Image (cartoon, rainbow, N blue to C red):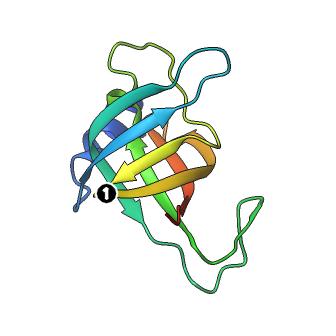
Protein backbone atom coordinates (compact mmCIF):
# COMPACT_ATOMS: atom_id res chain seq x y z
CA UNK A 1 0.00 0.00 0.00
CA UNK A 2 1.26 3.46 -0.93
CA UNK A 3 1.65 5.83 1.99
CA UNK A 4 2.85 9.42 2.22
CA UNK A 5 6.48 8.59 3.01
CA UNK A 6 6.72 6.19 0.05
CA UNK A 7 5.08 8.79 -2.23
CA UNK A 8 7.62 11.40 -1.11
CA UNK A 9 10.49 8.98 -1.72
CA UNK A 10 9.24 8.30 -5.26
CA UNK A 11 9.59 12.01 -6.09
CA UNK A 12 13.37 11.54 -6.01
CA UNK A 13 13.08 9.17 -8.99
CA UNK A 14 11.55 11.78 -11.31
CA UNK A 15 14.14 12.86 -13.92
CA UNK A 16 14.65 16.39 -15.22
CA UNK A 17 13.92 18.40 -12.11
CA UNK A 18 14.16 22.18 -12.39
CA UNK A 19 14.55 25.14 -10.06
CA UNK A 20 11.45 27.31 -9.86
CA UNK A 21 10.33 30.49 -8.14
CA UNK A 22 6.71 30.66 -7.05
CA UNK A 23 4.95 33.96 -6.42
CA UNK A 24 1.90 33.22 -4.30
CA UNK A 25 -0.88 35.78 -4.11
CA UNK A 26 -2.72 35.16 -0.83
CA UNK A 27 -6.10 36.76 -0.17
CA UNK A 28 -5.09 39.34 2.42
CA UNK A 29 -1.32 39.77 2.46
CA UNK A 30 1.57 40.79 0.24
CA UNK A 31 2.80 38.29 -2.35
CA UNK A 32 4.95 35.46 -0.98
CA UNK A 33 7.98 34.25 -2.94
CA UNK A 34 9.09 30.63 -2.53
CA UNK A 35 12.08 29.01 -4.23
CA UNK A 36 11.96 25.29 -4.95
CA UNK A 37 14.63 23.13 -6.55
CA UNK A 38 12.73 20.00 -7.54
CA UNK A 39 9.88 21.11 -9.81
CA UNK A 40 9.20 19.29 -13.06
CA UNK A 41 7.21 19.88 -16.23
CA UNK A 42 4.73 17.37 -17.61
CA UNK A 43 3.64 18.22 -21.16
CA UNK A 44 -0.01 17.65 -22.02
CA UNK A 45 -1.12 15.66 -25.05
CA UNK A 46 -1.76 18.13 -27.87
CA UNK A 47 -4.95 16.26 -28.80
CA UNK A 48 -6.65 16.83 -25.45
CA UNK A 49 -9.50 19.33 -25.37
CA UNK A 50 -10.05 19.04 -21.61
CA UNK A 51 -7.99 18.13 -18.56
CA UNK A 52 -10.13 17.31 -15.56
CA UNK A 53 -12.88 19.92 -15.61
CA UNK A 54 -10.69 22.49 -17.41
CA UNK A 55 -11.16 23.26 -21.11
CA UNK A 56 -7.75 23.51 -22.73
CA UNK A 57 -6.61 26.14 -25.24
CA UNK A 58 -3.58 24.09 -26.39
CA UNK A 59 -0.97 26.32 -24.72
CA UNK A 60 -1.12 24.73 -21.26
CA UNK A 61 1.37 22.49 -19.53
CA UNK A 62 1.51 20.88 -16.09
CA UNK A 63 4.08 21.88 -13.49
CA UNK A 64 4.50 19.68 -10.43
CA UNK A 65 5.82 21.13 -7.17
CA UNK A 66 6.67 18.97 -4.12
CA UNK A 67 4.61 20.11 -1.12
CA UNK A 68 7.61 19.45 1.14
CA UNK A 69 9.44 22.32 -0.60
CA UNK A 70 6.42 24.64 -0.69
CA UNK A 71 5.70 23.95 2.99
CA UNK A 72 8.97 22.86 4.62
CA UNK A 73 7.66 23.64 8.11
CA UNK A 74 4.00 22.74 7.52
CA UNK A 75 3.11 26.40 7.16
CA UNK A 76 -0.07 25.92 5.12
CA UNK A 77 0.93 27.58 1.84
CA UNK A 78 -1.30 26.78 -1.11
CA UNK A 79 -0.90 27.27 -4.85
CA UNK A 80 -3.98 28.87 -6.38
CA UNK A 81 -5.08 30.10 -9.76
CA UNK A 82 -3.47 33.46 -10.66
CA UNK A 83 -0.22 32.56 -8.83
CA UNK A 84 2.95 32.71 -10.92
CA UNK A 85 5.68 30.10 -11.45
CA UNK A 86 8.99 31.07 -13.06
CA UNK A 87 11.19 28.33 -14.49
CA UNK A 88 14.35 29.11 -16.46
CA UNK A 89 13.32 32.73 -17.02
CA UNK A 90 9.89 31.77 -18.38
CA UNK A 91 6.83 32.97 -16.46
CA UNK A 92 3.78 30.75 -16.18
CA UNK A 93 0.39 31.76 -14.76
CA UNK A 94 -1.44 29.07 -12.75
CA UNK A 95 -4.84 28.24 -14.22
CA UNK A 96 -5.67 25.40 -11.85
CA UNK A 97 -3.86 23.72 -8.95
CA UNK A 98 -4.55 20.84 -6.63
CA UNK A 99 -2.65 18.79 -4.07
CA UNK A 100 -2.18 15.22 -5.33
CA UNK A 101 -0.44 11.94 -4.50
CA UNK A 102 -1.26 11.62 -0.82
CA UNK A 103 -0.79 15.37 -0.30
CA UNK A 104 2.84 15.27 -1.50
CA UNK A 105 2.78 17.05 -4.90
CA UNK A 106 1.01 20.15 -6.22
CA UNK A 107 -0.19 19.61 -9.78
CA UNK A 108 -0.54 22.98 -11.51
CA UNK A 109 -2.01 23.53 -14.97
CA UNK A 110 -0.24 26.65 -16.25
CA UNK A 111 -0.12 28.91 -19.29
CA UNK A 112 3.04 30.60 -20.49
CA UNK A 113 2.83 34.37 -20.12
CA UNK A 114 3.57 36.42 -23.21
CA UNK A 115 5.74 39.44 -22.46
Q: Residue 54: where, in percent of width, then height?
A: 74, 61
Q: Quadrant of residue 1?
A: top left
Q: Residue 72: where, in percent of width, then height?
A: 32, 20
Circle 1: element type: loop
Residue at 57% x, 84% y is 46
Badge 1 local density, few (<14 within 10 Å), some, or many (20+)? few
Residue at 22% x, 53% y is 13
86 relative to 51, above or below: above
Q: Nearer the viewer, residue 84 or 71?
A: 84
Residue at 70% x, 71% y is 56
Residue at 46% x, 71% y is 43
Q: Nearer the viewer, residue 2 or 90?
A: 90
Q: Nearer the viewer, residue 107 or 36?
A: 36
Q: Residue 59: where, in percent of width, then height?
A: 58, 74
| Residue 103 in sight from this viewpoint | no
Report the number of discs. 1
| Residue 12 in sight from this viewpoint | yes
Q: Is residue 91 left or right of residue 58?
A: left
Q: Is residue 45 left or right of residue 72?
A: right
Q: Residue 29: where, in percent of width, then height?
A: 59, 15
| Residue that badge 1 annotates | 89
Amino acid sequence: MLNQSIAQALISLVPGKLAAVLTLLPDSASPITVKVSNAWLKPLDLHLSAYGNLNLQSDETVVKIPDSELNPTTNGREIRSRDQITIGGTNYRVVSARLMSLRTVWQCVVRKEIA
